[in-house]
Image (cartoon, rainbow, N blue to C red):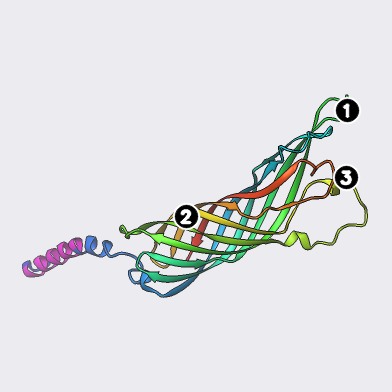
Amino acid sequence: MLKRKSFKKLCLLFLFSLMAVPAIADIPNLLGYDRKRLHFGFLLGYNQMLFDVKLDPNRPVSDTVYGINSYYAPGFNVGIIADLRLFEYANLRFNPGLSFSQKTIEYDLKMGDAMPEIRKRQIESVYLDVPLELKIRSKRWNEVRPYVLTGIIYSFDLASLRKPQNNINEEDDYAKANPHNFAYTVGVGSDFYLSYFKFAVELKMSFGLSNLFVDESNIYTSRIERITSRLFSFTVTFE
């Protein structure tokens, strides 16, 4: 049997352990992480993109195309993260990557006395994205730190480098887009600190600044004045 003194020691040790658990649990994860000058990571995201098509009101309605619409279509993006700490509440982020997207353009057609019809074209793109963003963070609350961000992004459509096919078909007459694009981005997100790494979830909107319209001088482009991009993305980052 245990001696009375030994039993008391074990009880005291057990009570001390119970008291120490909350203290240990309250120690924040990655306590010195935010003081690093530079760190790296990667990102995975889901996106939806469309072309914002503006028609020229001064041009007459074509006998063939009397309406053009664009709709969001799904895609995904991957990239790497380089994060530079400016001061306590602001970071500068450089996140180059690839964005795989698809845009759907719908043409409302009417051929003479024939019944109206709708024709759709899907444009598949692979963008090389070069963004620069300013990340403004709140004060850290336990293991969570919300933030907002804004920035500018340059994108180049790698799909435009594909060699054209020898056979010419009706698809070649549809509106084409300039492969070079500049856009500004705004978003919100939150960092979550785990034991060995930090991850974040963020929502962003990108609004194109460049006019992507390429005038092909055919019935599909005769009424178009301007085409800009619009992108919504949900991204998860690991740093």
Q: Residue 204 at what x, y percent from top left?
A: 52, 52
Q: Give the position of the N terminus as an image quadrant.
A: bottom left
Q: Residue 3 at what x, y percent from top left?
A: 8, 69
Whichever of labels 3 and 2 marks the residue nearer the N terminus, that label is 3
- Say what secondary structure mark 3 lies in: helix
Occupied quadrant, residue 200? bottom left
Q: Residue 130 at what x, y percent from top left?
A: 60, 65
Say if the magenta span includes residue 15. Answer: yes
- Compared to residue 179, the image places residue 39 above or below, namely below
Say if the magenta span includes residue 86. Answer: no
Q: Which residue is mark 3?
A: 170
For the residue pair 29 and 129, the one nearer the viewer reads as 129
What residue type is disc 2 on?
A: Val
- Say what secondary structure mark 2 lies in: strand
Residue at (33%, 69%) from the top-left corner? 31
- Horizontal relation, residue 236 to residue 71: left or right: left
Whether the residues at callouts 1 and 2 have beta carbons within 8 Å, the answer is no
| Comparing labels 3 and 1, the label whose residue is closer to the camera | 1
Q: Which residues are magenta?
A: 5-19
Q: Which mark is residue 112?
A: 1
Q: Residue 206 at what x, y percent from top left?
A: 57, 52
Q: Which mark is residue 201?
A: 2
Q: Main secondary structure of the magenta part?
A: helix
What residue type is disc 3 on?
A: Glu
What residue type is disc 1 on?
A: Gly
Q: Which mark is residue 34?
A: none
Residue at (81%, 27%) from the top-left corner? 116
Query: Spatial distance from mark 1 to mark 2, Cα to Cα?
Result: 52 Å
Residue at (41%, 75%) from the top-left corner? 37
Q: Residues within 10 Å of mark 1 (few under 14, many from 20)?
A: few
Whichever of labels 1 and 2 marks the residue nearer the N terminus, that label is 1
Query: Spatial distance from mark 3 to mark 2, Cα to Cα?
Result: 42 Å
